[in-house]
Image (cartoon, grey):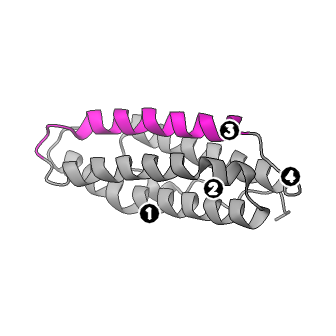
Amino acid sequence: MTAYEPTITWNPDWELGIEEIDDQHRRLVRMIAALQVQVRKQATALTVDSRLIHELLEYALTHFKDEEGIFRGKGWEGEAAHMLEHQNFMVKARGEMIRFQTGSPDTREALLGWLVGWLKNHIAFADREHGAYLHGKGLV
């Protein structure tokens, strides 16, 4: 692996069996991987191009709305907590944007680490839970 290769790649184990959501998750992983490559290429720059960050956050918001639309009102007891996870992510991610854009390379890598870790954990656990519920009820 070169210094410019992303440290996140799609893992087929993350698939929920809900095509729309799986496609969106794959796109989120590709977007984060592109951001990782950009940051590493611009490691000595005082700021990074914010275009990818904005696109990622806008797409994450779209994804969260779509995902919530699939499980909302279907009787899943984890619905409120899951939606709160989405809201908390957006608050933190938006709050970290300036630090990310103007921070040191170490700050940027730490924030990318948080982003990668959050996404992996969220898909592997929280999303898997609602996916299993919907499949179990025959709703997808």
Q: Is residue 132 visible?
A: no
Callout 3 amino acid: Leu
Disc 1 or disc 4, which is closer to the eye?
A: 4
Between the residue at mark 2 and the residue at mark 4, the CA separation in whole angstroms equals 18 Å
Q: Dot 2 corresponds to which residue?
A: 9
Q: Percent position (x, y) of residue 89?
A: 43, 52
Callout 4 amino acid: Lys
Q: Percent position (x, y) of residue 14?
A: 45, 56
Between the residue at mark 3 and the residue at mark 2, the CA separation in whole angstroms equals 17 Å
Q: Earlier in the sequence, mark 2 or mark 4?
A: 2
Q: Is residue 32 visible?
A: yes
Labels 4 & 3 near each other (Cβ < 8 A): no
Q: Dot 4 corresponds to which residue?
A: 41
Q: Dot 1 corresponds to which residue?
A: 121
- Residue displayed at 17% across by 41% down: 138
Is 99 above or below relative to 49?
below
Q: Earlier in the sequence, mark 3 or mark 2?
A: 2
Q: Residues within 10 Å of mark 4 (few under 14, many from 20)?
A: some
Q: Quadrant of the N terminus?
A: bottom right
The question of residue 72 being in magenta is answered with yes
Segment colored magenta: 50-75
View extreme (left): residue: 75
Q: Element at badge 2?
A: loop
Between the residue at mark 4 and the residue at mark 3, the CA separation in whole angstroms equals 14 Å
Q: Dot 3 corresponds to which residue?
A: 52
Disc 2 or disc 4, which is closer to the eye?
A: 4
The question of residue 79 being in magenta is answered with no
Q: Residues within 10 Å of mark 1 (few under 14, many from 20)?
A: few
**Residue 111 horizontal side relative to residue 42, left or right:** left
Q: Quadrant of the C terminus?
A: top left
